Image (spheres, rainbow, N blue to C red):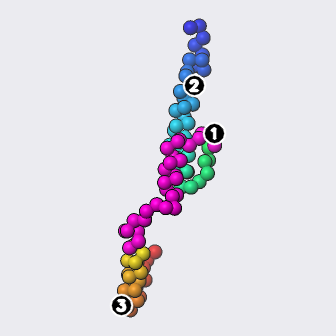
Amino acid sequence: MDDFDLRSVLDWDYYKQWFSKTVQKIITIPAALQDVQNPVPRIPHPEWLFKTLRRKHDKFQQQSLVSMFQVARAMNDVAQDKNSGSHNLQDI
């Protein structure tokens, strides 16, 4: 090997792949999970992310019983506050 230039010695394909995986982990995957369009379009989303997003936005997804009772519990707390007659000011 006569040419010891750093550009010819490095495996640039490896580093491009490593960099794109890092950008996916830090930028594109969190953006997709927050329903933001891909901010780095040159780096595509991984295949598993599309399945996760479809599952997240499925309108036929079964609802949890706990989520149904949280609204009733909050309404019950408001009704108790009105009945008690106390006017508590909360510090923000």
Mark 3 highlights which residue?
A: 84
From the image, state whether disc 3 or disc 1 is nearer to you: 1
Measuring from the top left, give residue 34's x and y in whole percent: 54, 55
In the rendered image, which quarter is residue 85 located in? bottom left
**Mark sitting earlier along the chain (3/2):** 2
Amino acid at circle 3: Ser
Amino acid at circle 2: Trp
Which residue corresponds to the image point at 55% horizontal and 21% vertical from the top-left?
A: 10
Q: Is residue 61 magenta?
A: yes
Measuring from the top left, give residue 69's x and y in whole percent: 38, 73
Q: What's the magenta region?
A: 41-69
Tell whether label 1 touches label 3 (CB within 8 Å).
Answer: no
Asked whether the viewer can see residue 33, the reply is: no
Quadrant (top left/top right/bottom left/bottom right) for the N terminus: top right
Which mark is drawn over residue 12? 2
Observer-nearest of 86 and 44: 44
* Residue lying at the far right of the rendered structure: 41
Mark 1 highlights which residue?
A: 42
Which residue corresponds to the image point at 46% horizontal and 74% vertical from the top-left?
A: 92
**Mark sitting earlier along the chain (2/1):** 2
Q: Is disc 1 surrounded by few (<14), some (14 to 19) or many (20+) residues within 10 Å? A: few
Asked whether the viewer can see residue 65, the reply is: yes
Alpha carbons under labels 3 and 2: distance apart:
71 Å
Which residue corresponds to the image point at 37% horizontal and 86% vertical from the top-left?
A: 80
Q: Is residue 54 above or below residue 8?
A: below
Alpha carbons under labels 2 and 1: distance apart:
17 Å
